[in-house]
Amino acid sequence: MRYVRARLVMSLAMSVTGWAQESAPVPADGQVPQDPSPPEPGAGHSFPVDVAGYVSFRYLNNDAFNEHRFYRDYASSLFLSKTLGRWRFHAEFNADTAAEYDAEGISLFPRRPSLSINLDSAFVNYNWRDSLQFQGGLLFIPTYWRTHRYQSTTLTVDEPLIDQTVFPTALKGGALYGEKYWGDTGVSYIVYGGIDTQSQYQESTQLVQNERARVVGGKVTLHLPSREFFSTFDIAVHRMHRDAPDNLPDELYAVELQLRRNRLEVLGEFEHASLDLVNGVRTFMRQGYYVQPSWRLNPRLFAVARYDRLDRDSRYADQSSLTRQSMGLTFRPVPAISLKIEADRYEPEGGRMPAYYGVTAAAVWFFHLP
C-alpha cells in the first residue's frame, strides 16, 4: 500500500484554503497560518508574494489494515500567497515520497513510485465582508482535518483513519463562506460545489480507476458561548451530496467538535458515507470517528492522545475495520521546529485479529521567507 523506501525530498510550507486547529502557532481566526515569528510591522518583504513552507520527515505505519509494517516518509509543502485589496491569490505545492499518500491535486510531473509533486490547491478569494467571501479554483473539501492537516501545526504524527477515506479530499469549483459574531456567540458557514478531484475514491476490482463526480455540500459551525469556562466551544455539521459517473449517488455527513480550556483541548470528528444509493438504499458504506485530547504541559511541550476507528463495509475491500489508540508528545524547542513521537496500538479487523504495536515519529521545520 504505502510502503516506500526513498531518499530525501525537499518539503515546503503551511497555509490553508482559508475556511476555518489544534494548539499551534496559528492566528485566532483560524485562517491561513503564518510564520510563528512574523516580521515587525512595516518590515519590507523581498519577494513579490508571501512565501512559506515546511519540511517534514515521518516514520509511519503502513495503512494496510492487516499488515504490521512501517516506512519512512519525506514530504514538503510550499505556499505562495498574494493579497491585493479585497483579492487574495493562493497556491499550495506538495512533494511526497509516498506517491499515493495524497490523492487530490494536479500532478506537475509524471508520478514515480517514490515521488509525487502536486499542485494541491490554487484559488482566488474575494473578501466582500467577514460574513460573505468567495473562493474559486482547486479547493480542499472543508472537513476539519483536511483544512488543518499541516505537520507544522498538528500535534500528532499521523492523520486520523477517516482522513482521505470517508469524504473526498478536494474539488475544482467554488465556495461561498463567512462568519458572524454576536458577543461571544457566532456562526460560520460554507457552501461549495464542483467536481471532486480524488481518484480511486471508491474501492474497485479494476487496476485503474479515475472517478470524477459532481459534488455539492455545506457546513455550519456554531461558536457557542463559553460563559468563561471554555475559550473555544465549536460544534459543526457537514453535509455532502455526490453524483458519481455511474449515476449512483452518495450521501455523506459529518459532525465535528472542538473544545479548549486553558491547557486542555479536545478534538473530535464523526464521518459517514452511504455509497452507491439505489432507490435510497446504500450498496455499501464507510464511517469512522476519532477523539483527540491534548494537554499543554508547558509552552514548548504537549501531550496528546487519540482513539480512532474506521469501518469499511464494501463489496471489494479485503479489510473491514481498524481501531487505533495513540499516545505521544510534541516538543517545540522553537516555534518553527516540531518534534513528535507516538506509541500506537492497532486492532485490525475490529479486534478479530491480534493487536500489534508500533512507534511513529516526526521532525518538522516551518519557514516563512522575508
Image (cartoon, grey):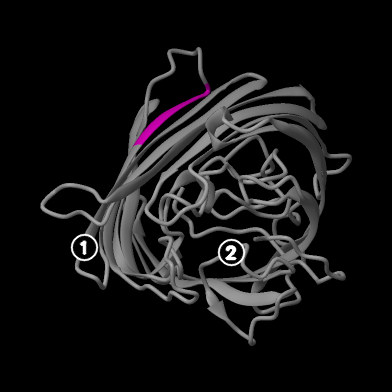
Residue 286 placement, left or right of 295? left
Element type where label 1 sits in the image? loop
Return the residue at label 2: 102
User: At 53% from the left edge and 78% from the top edge, which residue is drawn?
Assistant: 106
Where does residue 208 sit, x and y in percent of width and height?
A: 48, 77
Specify the segment rendered in magenta. 231-236
Q: Earlier in the sequence, mark 2 or mark 1?
A: 2
User: At 61% from the left edge and 67% from the top edge, which residue is drawn?
Assistant: 100
Q: How many marks are shown on the rendered structure?
A: 2
Q: Amino acid at mark 1?
A: Leu
Q: Quadrant of the C terminus?
A: bottom right
Compare residues 291 and 234 and report the one nearer the observer: 291
Return the residue at label 1: 248
Task: Classify 10 Å Cα crowding around label 1: few (below 14), some (14-19), many (20 and above).
Answer: some
Residue 365 in view here:
no
Where does residue 207 sit, x and y in percent of width and height?
A: 50, 75
